[in-house]
Amino acid sequence: MLLAEAGICSRRHAEDLIRAGRVRVNGAPAVLGQKAAWDADAIAVDGRPIAPGQEKVSYLLNKPAGVVTTLDDPQGRPSVQRFVQGLPWRLFPVGRLDRDSEGLLLLTNDGQLANQLMHPRFHVPKTYVATVDGPADEAVLRGLLQGVALRDGVLRCLGARRLPDAEPGFGRVELSIAEGRKRVVRRALAALGRDTVRLQRIAIGPLQLGDLEAGALRRLTAAEDRALRAAIAEAASSDPRRAAPLRGEGAPPRAARST
């Protein structure tokens, strides 16, 4: 996909741009599946000509709660666009982080990198800290590790450990997953009887949030970029998903389970 090659967006978002009529080839609206070439066609997005070969860059953002992970929100809500204005590159977010969640978000103009991170084949782990209403006790940890049955499939964490409580009555758990279903961490914890009052993503593979302040943005170092690509390659060679016992939301009755 030429838009991804040019660093305009991911392949998935490119289809949305085409459907919205924001892409033109030789002055005419582009259509899905249309062929084009850099040396033969004039391609523009939102009236701006694009070309291949721009520098590929990636940034880390500590997304605050209340901000949507999009560059153009039709409802006028605060979006991550405000944090990348003024940069010389057109960056787009890789994947999503719920509006009421916060923490590490990767933004890039490297379409190939974005596609790899979002493709189900690669499974780069993401790590979160969840503050829950109630204790993060052994039953919660055991459920996350053994597997929680949700309506759209089982979630089994790659790792989970208890952290010191945020305050009396509110437990904290650090957990790692290798997928990105919508609100999957919150739904899994709810299935285990815990409402999530705060959810912060602290890592994507080798990338760490560290002490980056809320709303702050910084460019990946060369070492971080190499480490991320190495993690993608490693994740592609293995599949962390394994069969897991079902429990919680959507699980069939015990008598109906196969052995």
Image (cartoon, rainbow, N blue to C red):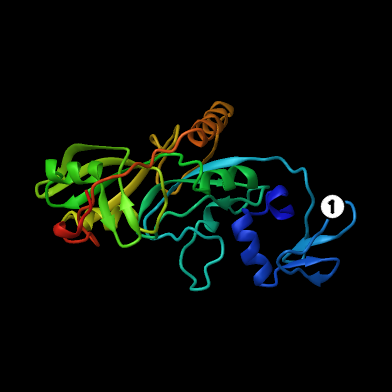
125 left or right of 6 in image? left
Taking depth in this image into account, of 55 and 190 the one nearest to the observer is 190
Q: List x then y, in percent, for residue 249.
A: 23, 60
Say what secondary structure mark 1 lies in. loop
Write the residue at 35% across / 54% down: 101
Q: Is the residue 157 above or below the residue 97 in the image?
A: above
Taking depth in this image into account, of 214 and 55 the one nearest to the observer is 55
Q: List x then y, in percent, for residue 66.
A: 38, 60
Write the residue at 30% across / 50% down: 199
Residue type indicated by callout 1: Trp
Q: Is the residue 62 above or below the residue 100 in the image?
A: above
14 left or right of 29 in image? left
Residue at far right of view: 40
Taking depth in this image into account, of 148 and 187 the one nearest to the observer is 148
Residue at far left of view: 168
Reading the image, the residue beneath label 1 is: 38
Write the residue at 90% across / 56% down: 40
Q: List x then y, in percent, for residue 136.
A: 15, 45
Callout 1: few (<14), some (14-19), or many (20+) C-alpha neighbours within 10 Å?
few
